[in-house]
Image: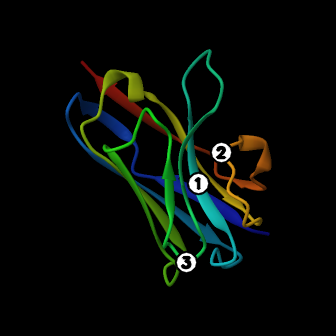
Amino acid sequence: QVQLVESGGGLVQAGGSLRLSCAASGRTLSSYALGWFRQAPGKEREFVARINRSGSRTYYGDSVKGRFTISRDNAKNTVYLQMNSLKPEDTAVYYCAADENIVVTIRAIDYELWGQGTQVTVSP
């Protein structure tokens, strides 16, 4: 059984940076596209970023374009989210997710595997 475990969340001031990691155990992630989503209290889960299996293509939600970067290291079975210029509105629980299909999707329902989430809090 594949498990995804996020780490790297925490409290940071506005304008600061954080790097999230998501490591997989139990199965290689190289056959999955990987994504990051976030969910703030009282809000729906929001697409943040996606990276294809090889790491050659990336996609971002409009609210994070130019500030966040998704990357992956298939040898380490890990996906990353570098978050720069953080804003208070970036505060949320961040989840990594894996999608077996090659068709690009930003819908959470299309991702088969999920981590437990890591809290990111950005203070003003």
* N-term mark: 3 or 1: 1
Closer mark to the observer between disc 2 and disc 1:
2
Q: Secondary structure at mark 2?
A: loop
Query: Mark 2 to mark 1: distance in Å?
Result: 8 Å
Is residue 117 shown above or below 5?
A: above
Q: Residue drawn at (37%, 29%), measured in percent from left and top?
A: 121
- Left or right? Give the position of 3 relative to 118: right
Residue matched to label 3: 54
Tell me which amino acid carries mark 2: Ile
Q: Residues within 10 Å of mark 3 (few under 14, many from 20)?
A: some
Query: Mark 3 to mark 2: distance in Å?
Result: 18 Å
Residue matched to label 1: 35
Is residue 79 shown above or below 82?
A: below
Q: Secondary structure at mark 1?
A: strand
Residue 61, how many percent across, how many down? 50, 40
Residue matched to label 2: 106
Q: Residue drawn at (54%, 66%), measured in percent from left and top?
A: 23
Q: Quadrant of residue 1?
A: bottom right
Residues marked 2 and 1 touching at CB (< 8 Å): yes
Is residue 22 shown above or below 17?
A: below
Q: Residues within 10 Å of mark 2 (few under 14, many from 20)?
A: some
